[in-house]
Amino acid sequence: MDSKLIERFWKYVDKSGGDEACWTWLAYRESKKGHEYGRLSRSEGQSPYYAHRLSYEIAHGSIPNGLEVCHQCDNPGCVNPMHLFLGTHEDNMDDASQKGRVRGKVMYGEENPSSVLTWEKVRAIRSAYKTKKGKYTRGFDGGVTLKSLARQHGVSFQTIQNIVKNEIWKES
């Protein structure tokens, strides 16, 4: 790594709290979903690079593709390499969830508290929409329509369509 870049990087770091404390990034910060991450251009004319990622690279070497640099301290402005670790996006989200920083993983089906439907209702929708031969009626031959199923269950036409196409509420 370029020694001039490393020297420039450390000019913008406040280490006054000691080795165990968060080292605060003092230069430009970019707000990302309410968190202010430090940014620094690697060279003139290049777009800014995340300061915590640069700190990790200075201390530990390159970051493998597909991995994120996560904060143990949950302080996006911290660049102390002892507070940083590598993980997948899922690892990062699990860490945030365990620490109460996010609501948790996306919940599907009945697990989602906002869900209007249950598995029992989904199976009833699919059953009502099929003919005796197992083909979808699409409302022809006196069969039930997607629109009427949507009204009956208090969801959108698109939701019913996605259910009968098995694009959501997928059975294993």
Image (cartoon, rainbow, N blue to C red):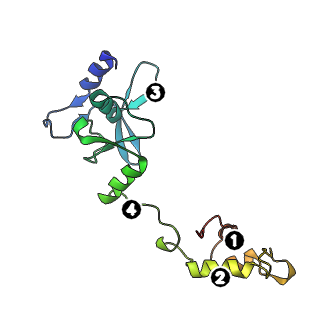
Label 3 crowding class (10 Å Cα cut-off): few <14, some 14-19, many 20+?
A: few
Looking at the rendered structure, the secondary structure element under dot 1 is helix
Looking at the image, is mark 3 or mark 1 nearer the viewer?
A: 1
**How far across and down, in percent of the image, does residue 49 sit?**
40, 30
Pick whichever, 92 or 170, lies toward us.
170
Q: Which residue is mark 1?
A: 164
Looking at the rendered structure, the secondary structure element under dot 3 is loop
**Amino acid type, mark 3:** Ser
The image shows residue 79, relative to residue 98, as above or below, that is above
Q: Residue furthest right?
A: 141
Q: Earlier in the sequence, mark 2 or mark 4?
A: 4
Name the residue at 41% across, 19% down: 43
- On the picture, is 102 further left or further right than 126? left
The image shows residue 54, relative to residue 88, as above or below, that is above
Q: Which residue is mark 3?
A: 47
Looking at the rendered structure, the secondary structure element under dot 2 is helix
Name the image quarter holding residue 71: top left
Name the residue at 65% across, 69% down: 159
Q: CA distance from mark 3 to mark 1?
A: 46 Å
- Marks 2,1: beta carbons within 8 A: no
- Marks 4,3: beta carbons within 8 A: no
**How far across and down, in percent of the image, does residue 80 sit?**
23, 36
Q: Which residue is mark 4?
A: 103
**Amino acid type, mark 2:** Ala
Name the residue at 33% across, 32% down: 51
Q: Which residue is mark 2?
A: 124
**How far across and down, in percent of the image, does residue 3 sit?**
30, 16
**Amino acid type, mark 1:** Val
